[in-house]
């Protein structure tokens, strides 16, 4: 039976038992997830000086490949862990994954003592494997704890760890590298990750689909063990495909900006010393990213009362607003540079909660982890797996050209999300009533 997605059902009026402790733990894990990722960006210039002291032409390319090594293993192994998360305990997968990436992060610091650049590449690849287990499982746990009507705001709280963790990673990495050897920045995140990973192993999974009120009787989605053919339905959901395209373009932009912005501000624009720039840029990322991520989730949920496609509408409009401010930032001086950068980051992060909520809402609970895993594969393969080395190569000639490409990808993301508005309501209605879809009208 098809049911209007905007109607509140009785079983979905409140979260399931244990929802808040689970959300807090997953939020903390996600925070250290992004601290770990951005520590590398904060110290990459120090790493380059150690391993490429003569600064050959391809030095920036190889430094970008450190990010790509992580992303390649992350996106390739994510579908495997997504399939497992649809069938086994997601908390065990989360706990084991956090332990793996925490130990591998410590291994990145050891590259300064043993093995050199090759060991650093290998450990960053292992970090990607660890995060691939966590990436698909965590948002599906939250989706099974919270009903559709509250999912946007709750997932926004979860994803606020992206800007906050990224900013902390910049700040921690730059401050440590300024006063100590860069390797110590990687050691700093090992112990908290181990503690959080062990805590996850003691948590219990919520029932799959119970929070999805999909029929008038108030029953959640039925328990189904998906077959291989059931996963093909994802390729027939227009809003899922367009969301993946929009998120890939957005991820390309964020990946390039987050990796190269510290180097651009210090070496090219010469706006200050490394530690000072790291703290200012980190502060901007925290304030802009935190406020916009939370506001985006709240606005998406609120507007959905009247516009069922609100998650795409909010995402598309926001990133189109962000686009020109990246271009303005390249030509601004002093406070105007920081102001334009703040506005660009604010509207760039605005889509995080809504776009991921739409991803959860159009996938049946039995294949939801795989839906997130395939999304991870697509958005990183076409996004930040290629943007750091590509933009580093372009930036060697002209950083204006590099950030011009970033602005173009942001505009493309907005187009994909606005295009998806026509399909989102229908796809949300049908998500839990079947696994095999009719041919797509796209």
Image: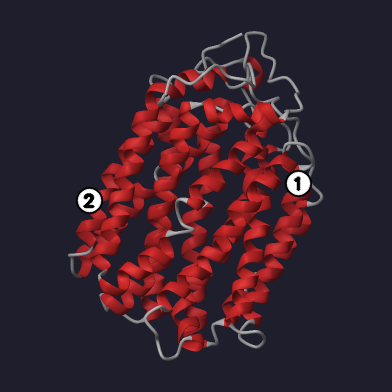
The dot on residue 91 is 1
Number of residues whose C-alpha sits closer than 10 Å to that of mark 2, classed few (under 14), some (14–19) or many (20 or more): some
Q: Residue at x 29, y 48 (%)?
A: 322
Tell me the element at label 2.
helix
Q: In the rendered image of this protein, does residue 65 appear above or below residue 417? A: below
Say which residue appears at 47% left-offset and 74% top-offset: 63
Circle nearer the N terminus (2, 1): 1
Q: Return the x and y of residue 87 as percentages of the image width and height.
A: 77, 37
Task: Residue 83: give its label.
Answer: none
Question: In the drawing, does residue 240 fall left or right of residue 420?
Answer: right
Q: Is residue 283 visible?
A: no
- State the image quarter where residue 363 is shown: top right
Residue 102 left/right relative to 39:
right
Where is the N terminus found, in terms of image quarters?
top right
Question: Which residue is at a point 70% across and 31% down the rendered structure image?
Answer: 228
Percent across and percent down for residue 260 are 38, 68
Crowdedness near tag 1: few (<14), some (14–19) or many (≥20) residues, C-alpha within 10 Å: many
**Image point 39% across, 61% down: which residue?**
256
Task: Give the secondary structure at mark 1.
Answer: helix
In the rendered view, tell whether residue 327 sits above or below residue 358: below
Residue extending furthest toward the right:
202
Residue underneath mark 2: 324
Q: Position of residue 40 (x, y in %)?
A: 52, 71
The colour scheme applied to this rendered structure is secondary structure
Observer-nearest residue: 343 or 93? 93
Q: CA distance from mark 2 to mark 1?
A: 41 Å
Q: Quadrant of residue 210?
A: top right
* Residue 28 percent location from the top left of the image: 62, 55
């Amino acid at each position: 039976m098809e049911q209007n997605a905007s109607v509140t059902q009785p079983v979905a009026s409140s979260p399931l038992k244990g929802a808040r402790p689970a959300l807090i733990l997953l939020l903390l894990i996600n925070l250290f997830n992004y601290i770990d990722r951005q520590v590398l960006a904060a110290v990459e210039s120090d790493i380059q000086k150690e391993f490429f002291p003569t600064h050959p032409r391809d030095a920036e390319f190889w430094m970008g490949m450190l990010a790509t090594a992580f992303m390649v293993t992350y996106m390739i192994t994510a579908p495997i862990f997504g399939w497992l998360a649809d069938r086994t305990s997601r908390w065990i997968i989360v706990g084991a994954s956090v332990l793996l990436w925490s130990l591998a992060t410590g291994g990145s610091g050891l590259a300064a003592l043993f093995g050199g650049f090759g060991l650093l590449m290998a450990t960053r690849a292992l970090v990607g494997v660890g995060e691939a287990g966590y990436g698909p499982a965590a948002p599906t746990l939250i989706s099974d704890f919270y009903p559709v009507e509250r999912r946007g705001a709750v997932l926004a709280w979860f994803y606020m760890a992206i800007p906050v963790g990224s900013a902390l990673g910049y700040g921690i990495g730059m401050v440590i590298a300024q006063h100590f050897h860069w390797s110590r920045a990687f050691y700093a995140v090992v112990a908290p990750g181990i503690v959080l990973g062990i805590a996850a192993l003691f948590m219990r999974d919520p029932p799959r689909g119970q929070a999805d009120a999909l029929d008038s009787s108030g029953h959640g989605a039925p328990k189904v063990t998906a077959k291989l053919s059931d996963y093909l339905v994802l390729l027939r959901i227009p809003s899922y495909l367009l969301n993946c395209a929009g998120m890939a373009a957005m991820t390309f932009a964020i990946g390039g900006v987050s990796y190269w912005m510290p180097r651009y501000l210090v070496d090219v624009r010469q706006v200050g010393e490394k530690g000072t720039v790291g703290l200012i840029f980190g502060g901007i990322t925290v304030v802009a990213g935190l406020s916009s991520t939370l506001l985006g989730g709240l606005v998406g949920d609120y507007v959905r009362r009247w516009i069922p496609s609100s998650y795409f509408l909010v995402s598309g409009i926001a990133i189109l607003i962000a686009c020109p401010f990246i271009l303005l930032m390249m030509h601004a001086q002093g406070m105007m540079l920081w102001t334009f950068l703040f506005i660009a980051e604010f509207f760039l992060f605005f889509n995080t909660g809504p776009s991921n909520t739409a991803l959860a809402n159009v996938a049946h609970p039995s294949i939801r982890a795989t839906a997130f895993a395939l999304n991870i594969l697509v958005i990183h393969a076409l996004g930040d797996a290629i943007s750091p080395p590509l933009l580093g190569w372009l930036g060697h000639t002209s950083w204006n050209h590099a950030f011009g490409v970033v602005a173009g990808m942001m505009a493309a993301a907005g187009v994909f999300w606005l295009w998806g508005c026509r399909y989102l309501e229908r796809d949300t209605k049908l998500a839990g009533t079947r696994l095999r879809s009719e041919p797509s009208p796209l």
